[in-house]
Amino acid sequence: MLKTNNHQQIIFSAFVNSGLENQTGNQNQVTQPKADLLQPLREWLDSLEIQNRKLARFIAKMIPAQCPFERDIILFGYKIAHIPPMCKLNPLYDQFVGLRFRALCYLVDVCGEDVQSYC
């Protein structure tokens, strides 16, 4: 809470917990977690089981092993810039990495394939 020159109170309850929760009527709206619309898709990707060789190969080929957008820009032999990986901005990044890992594990453990060509 801040006081101005003419002694008016300004309450920043969304940013500072000053013990005035009962005085602000919309405090509950600020603290409620927002609905995650991607959660059902995350759960579906996490629960997806790989039980088909063709599907496992397709997933291993389609999901890259490393971010394809990460680059070093080199001019006349000197590194002048670095473009960082943008994959972490993808809200489903962890699920795709896990799915690729499960597909590679299926190919190695069940099918007995060498997966070095996918790396």
Image: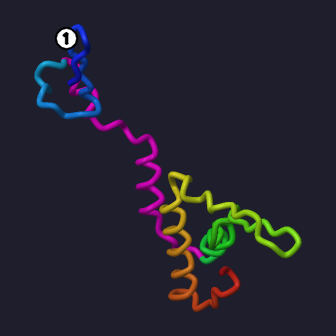
Q: Residue at label 1?
A: 7
Determine the residue positioned at 76% across, 65% down: 80
Q: Secondary structure at mark 1?
A: loop
- Please provide percent x and percent y for residue 65: 63, 73
State which quadrant residue 66 falls in: bottom right
Determine the residue positioned at 72% across, 66% down: 71
Magenta segment range? Answer: 25-52
Q: Residue furthest top?
A: 6
Q: Residue furthest right?
A: 76
- Please provide percent x and percent y for residue 51: 52, 74
Q: Is residue 97 above or below residue 44?
A: below
Amino acid under label 1?
A: His
Image-based side of 81 in relation to 92, left or right: right
User: Dot 1 surroundings within 10 Å: few (below 14), some, or many (20 or more)?
Assistant: few
Q: How is the image coloured?
A: rainbow
* Residue 32 is covered by the magenta coloring: yes
Q: Residue furthest front?
A: 5
